Each structure stands twice: as structure tokens, then as C-alpha cells.
Image (cartoon, rainbow, N blue to C red):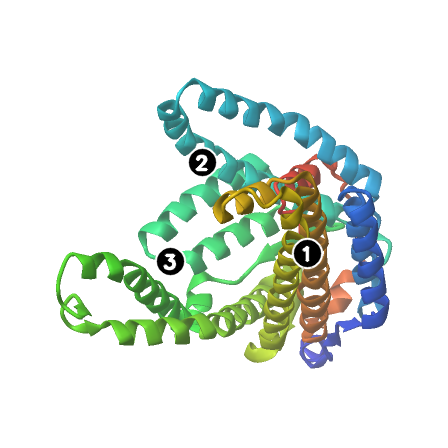
Amino acid sequence: MHQAVANQAAPADQVSFSGERPAFSKLVTRGALLELVTFGFYRFWLATDIRRHLWSHTSVGGDPAEYTGRAKELLIGFLVAMAILMPVYLVYFLIGLEAERLQAFASIPLIVFFYLFTEFARYRACRYRLTRTLWRGLRFSMGGSGLSYSWRSGLWWLLVIVSLGLALPWRLAALERFKMRHTAYGSLQGRFDGTGGDLFKRAWGLWLVALLTAFVLGTGLASPILLSMTSSTAVFGFIPTWFLALSAIILVIAAPFAYAAFKAIEWRWWVSGLRFGEVRFESELETEALFGRYWAVIGWSLLLLLLFAIWNFGAFLLISPLVGTGHDSQQRLLTASQHPAMLAIFVIGYLFAAIAIGAVLRLYLNRDVWRLVAQSTVVHNLAAASDVVGQGVAAGALGEGLADGLDIAGF
């Protein structure tokens, strides 16, 4: 009886994050430059450095985590993944050469294949990262079948589409239960206690906003076609077109706020559902905590795309006189755009823009979101993890390579 009261009164342990933003910015900037000169191959080393930084500066109960993955493992996994994926691309290309009709027919099974393959890779990548994570010297482990996870995810997405997104919370809960059922910290078995109903109660208003946004934008895009079929100044005879345009503008501006709010709710729900034996977690992440992070990404991305457009326009002004004056304006535009120097400048500008946007994403959506989630998390009954026996082995890097080849590797 007294022991039970003592356990209930035991204080929760706060998760802490001690990583400095300037140090992470320097790491990402240096990595981005090395990505540029190595044509992207340095990303395996950059991903490893980022994980080591985030893991090592995140402490639970005063003990930091440790990431033991190596960049060479990611590179080898990526090369193996390319050996699997390239024949698929080649077959689809050959089908396209045979006949456009066959190519169109093959697109449906190709899309289904790549979706299921992506989910398989996502699960295997998660397993790789978990089995390379240590805390107090003990390794996390994860079993389960990536194929089983993949077809479950596919069936759930069909239900999400049919239900107009209503089934999304239940899909997320079912997949998290599957992952945590096969996850453990040493001998401490994991589980997920979050429910789809709980997530829906927290985010049903955002679901309505998303549905309204899709309806208004869809109707707005279709309105020119509808108006061309009728002399009315309103779509369907009762929605003024100016109202649709205004609504579309408002909803586009509101969309980042709604998405950031949903991600904060999802993070809070996910963290609070995690269990390892009697150890449980709780998140106090505020709903509006991620607003600034997502708007920063949008702002920097728009600025970088604007600079990319200015770069290309300036290059065109310099190169267009080189194509001569004997052509008409349309022909000169086409000739200048196909000039080898213009193509080289475009590729250089594209690489700079893509790598810079990648650095922005890593800074604001990887590091900053990690910090916010970590610092808003408390752990209850951490003492239950004191007498844990180590078990499990490190998983292979093939899943991480597949995820990288499909551009879903994460951080």
C-alpha cells in the first residue's frame, strides 16, 4: 500500500535537449556545401552527423542517448536499394517505348507497387534507426515484418480515401500499435496506448478545415470550366466567384497554421501513447508551438526560389545576345534556353537552391521540432527501466537505403 502511494507520488523526469542552434547550423551548412561538391553523396555522412548531434544532446533522467549508425552502412544500403529499384524503372521505361497505351495501363500497378514499397522501406528504416539507438548502454530493438506493415498501411489508406480523410486517426493508431508491438528497450516490451478516437477528438476541427479547403479550392479550380458552360456569374448559381477566390486566398494562408497545429496535436498524442513496460511518456507541446517553424520554412523556401528565378533570368539576359539577332523573339528565346551554358547555369542554380532548401528543412523541421518535442516531454516511472536486460541485434541498413532511394529517409 505504502509502496503504491510512493510510486504514484514519484516525480516525473523531464526530457532535456542541450544542443546549441549555432553548432547545428554550422554542421548543416558545412554538410550542404559538401553535398554540393560531392553531387549529393555526402548526405549519408550528413545524416549520420545530424543523428549523432540530436541523439547525444537529448537526455532522459540525466542520461543522453547514443546513435551508433555509420555513414558507410547507409551508402551500402543505398547502393543495394538502387540495384533493386533500377530494374523496375527500366521495365517501366521499356513499356513506355512499346506503346503509350501500355505505359498508361502499367502506371496503376507501378503506383501501387511504389506506395507499398515505400511503406516497406519506411518500416525498415525505422528499425535501422532504433537498433542503432542506445540509452544507458542498452540497445533498442525492433522486429516485425516490413511487408506486413506495408499491406496494412495500403489497406488503411484505401479506407482513408473512401472516408474523405475521416479514418486517418485510426490508421495512424493502428500502424503505431503494430510498430510498438514489435519494439523493445532491452527486455522492456513496448506498446502504444493511443487510440484513433482520442486523436480524432483532438483534431476533428482541423479535419473540417481541411475538407472545406479541398472543397473550396477544388470548386475554385473548376469554376472557369463551369462558367464556360453557363452564362451565370456564379458557380452552381448560388456561390459568387469572388467569394470563391477570396475563400481560396484565406484558406491558402490558413493552411500552414492548420497543418502545424495538426502536427503539434499528433506529436502530443503520439508521445503520450508510448509505453515501455511501466514507463510512460507525456507531452505538453502547445498546439501553436510549430507555427513559426513551418512559416520560417515557407518564407525561406520562397526566398530561395525567387533567387533561383533571378539567377536564371540574369543568365538568360547574358546568354541571349550570343545566339545572334537574326531570329525572331520566340526562336531566340528557345535557342537561348537550350544553349549549353544556360543549361549548365540552370543545373548549378538548381543544385544550390535544392541543397539550401534541404538545409532549411533540417534546421527548422528536424532540429527545432526535435527540440520542442523533447523539451515538452516528461517520463513517468522511469525507475522501471533500471533493471533491464539487454537483448536484440542491430538491423541491416538495407531498409534505410531503400528509404533514401525513395527520398523518405528522414533524419
CA separation in Å, label 1 and label 3? 33 Å
Label 2 close to label 3 by CB (< 8 Å): no
Q: Quadrant of residue 340?
A: top right
In the depicted structure, whether residue 335 falls above or below residue 110: below
| Number of the label disc, if any, that sits on residue 353 | 1
Label at residue 112: 2
Residue found at x 62% / y 43%: 324
Quadrant for the N terminus in the image: bottom right
- Upstream in the sequence, badge 1 or badge 3? 3
Tell me what residue is drawn at x 70 percent, y 81 percent: 9
Residue 169 percent coordinates (x, y): 44, 60
What's the CA distance linking mark 2 and mark 1? 31 Å
Residue 175 in view of the camera: yes
Q: Residues within 10 Å of mark 1 (few under 14, many from 20)?
A: some
44 horizontally vs 238: left or right? right
Label 3: how many Cα within 10 Å (few below 14, some 14–19, many 20+): some
**In the image: residue 223, left or right of residue 16:** left
Residue topped by disc 3: 165
Lower sequence index among marks 2 and 1: 2
What type is the residue that disc 1 sits on?
Ala
**Above or below: residue 385 compared with residue 121:** below
* Callout 2 amino acid: Val
Question: Does 239 sit left or right of 341 as displayed?
Answer: left
Between 255 and 181, the residue placed more toward the observer is 255
